[in-house]
Amino acid sequence: MAKHVFYHAGCPVCVSAEQDIVTLIGKENVEVVHLGDQKDRVTEADKAGVKSVPALVLEGGNVLHINFGASIEDLKN
Amino acid sequence: MAKHVFYHAGCPVCVSAEQDIVTLIGKENVEVVHLGDQKDRVTEADKAGVKSVPALVLEGGNVLHINFGASIEDLKN
């Protein structure tokens, strides 16, 4: 049974991240949910704390949002 | 030997993500690099394609940026 849930919406960055996550933690450990196709699960994702996709909701309840954020440029100075 | 490299900068979200990643993929499979403490590795991270931290650079070269991105609110409509 899947321990973790990976939510995405079919965008290219989502698909790429999905492949990476599945490779990383093993297909049997992660349930992949396409929120564009499964609109009824958006509420579930929202309640789990998902603020953006792609996101990985861990067994323990923590949410990893996988995305581009602040620039590393700031760390160079 | 570590297969993957997790770059962070000591911010609270980084530390939380680090614990999650280490739990998820196993301590022996990931090298944790604090770019605030190890400034000499910023260039290496940059070359690997890291645009923000926290980020996980996978063995195969893909980079997962872990952060808050676009809102899930957009998916509700």
Image (cartoon, coloured by chain):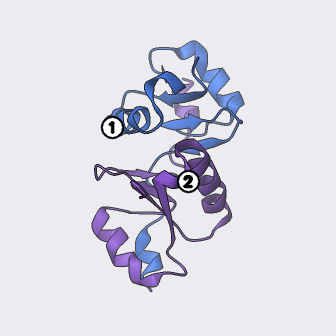
Chain colours: A blue, B purple
Q: Which residue lies furthest to the front in this view?
A: B1
Give x and y (percent) for residue A36: 45, 20
- Which residue is at the front of the view, A55 or B24? B24
Q: Disc 2, disc 1: CB below 8 Å?
A: no
Q: Farthest residue toward the bottom?
A: A77
Between label 2 and label 1, give the one nearer the viewer.
2
Coordinates of residue B4 in the picture (x, y in percent): 41, 55
Location of the C terminus of chain A (image quadrant): bottom left
Q: Which of B16 and B5 is in front in this view?
A: B5
Check disc 1: other Cα within 10 Å, few if <14, some if 14-19, many if 20+: some
Residue B24 horizontal side relative to residue A72, left or right: right
Q: Numbered disc 2: what chain? A: B
Q: Give the chain of mark 1.
A: A
Please name the residue shown 59% across and 56% down the image. B18
Reading the image, the residue beneath label 1 is A16
Task: Give above or below for B71 relative to B33.
Answer: above
| Residue B15 appears left or right of B60 | right
Question: In which quadrant of the rendered view does residue A47 lie?
Answer: top right
The reply to whether residue A69 is in sight is no
Question: Which element is circle 1 on?
Answer: helix
Query: Horizontal placement of B72 versus B31: left or right?
Result: right
**Is residue B50 shown to the viewer in this render?**
yes
For label 2, count other residues whose C-alpha is less than 10 Å away and answer few (under 14), some (14-19) or many (20+): few
Which residue carries the number 2 mark? B27
